[in-house]
Image (cartoon, rainbow, N blue to C red):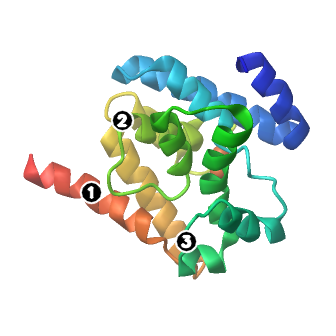
Amino acid sequence: MDYGEITAELALRLSPKRLQHSLGVSKSAESLAEQFGSNREKAKLAGLLHDLAREVPMNELLPRAQAFGIVVNDVEQAQPILLHAFLAAKMAEEEFGVHDAEILQAIMMHTTGGSDMTLLDKIVYIADVIEPQRTFKGVDEIRKIAKVDLDKAMLVALDQSIYHIMKNGGLLHPATIAARNAILLKKTIK
Ligand SMILES: [Fe+2]
Ligand SMILES: [Fe+2]
């Protein structure tokens, strides 16, 4: 499937707003890839597909993830919405014929982050945060930082996400803590 065909298929699965978000992430990921020397085509495709499973009904997320053999931890069990990222990676492979491991991993990591994020993983994570339709408080600051330092942008975005979850009394996913620690450790070792 080419980009246009995937977009048409996504239009059947996502609300117009989510489709626009996906196209925005795709575009932002492409320009971040150009800026930081990653593969533009991979970034574009991972961005387009990242929320493929975002509108799978809530009660189907867990059984569908389990049917794919995804190992579900306690936090995901309690908040199945987190599984949309894992499920999207599996669906991208099975239903859209995407077999590139880097693209699939970037899709998989877009919500929680992870300890060993590649450049592409970070690009898709940040593109999801800063795509043009995002309007949350602090987004312009992250957009500005992302123009110069992707790791710094990740750190600020992860901090914001963690603050937000804590403020709402939510569960923190271990991969989000791991992602933040990995960036801080990398800075310390440098
Ligand atoms: Fe998502
Ligand atoms: Fe998204």
Q: Which residue is mark 1?
A: 182
Report helix, strand or loop for mark 2.
Answer: helix
- Determine which quarter of the picture holds residue 9: top right
> Of label 2 and label 3, which has the lower sequence position?
2
Tell me if 78 is positioned left or right of 103 in this view: right
- Tell me the distance, in whole angstroms, between the alpha carbons under discs 2 and 3: 25 Å
Say which quarter of the image contains residue 133: top right
Relative vertical location of residue 172 with respect to residue 126 in this rendering, above or below: below
The three-letter code of the residue at mark 1 reads: Ala
Say if 175 sits above or below 147 in the image.
below
Q: Which of the two discs, 1 and 2, labels the residue nearer the N terminus?
A: 2
Q: Amino acid at mark 3?
A: Ile
Q: Is mark 2 within 8 Å of ligand 2?
A: no
Q: In the image, residue 161 lies at what x, y percent?
A: 51, 61
Residue 179 spot, x, y in % from top left: 36, 58
- The crowding category of the residue bearing disc 3, from other C-alpha atoms within 10 Å (few below 14, some 14 to 19, many at least 20), is some
**Residue at horizontal 73%, vertical 43%?**
52
Residue 57's disc is none
Residue at which label 3 appears: 165
Q: Position of residue 165 (x, y in %)?
A: 55, 71
Q: Which residue is mark 2?
A: 119
- State the SS at label 1: helix
118 vs 183, left or right, is: right
Residue 135 appearing in the image: no
- Residue 163 shows up from this direction: yes
* Foreground pick, 13 / 170: 13
> In which quadrant will I find the C terminus?
top left
Q: How many marks?
A: 3
Q: Quadrant of residue 17?
A: top right
Q: Dot 1: few (<14), some (14–19), or many (≥20) neighbours within 10 Å?
A: some
- Between 154 and 10, the one lying in front of the other is 10
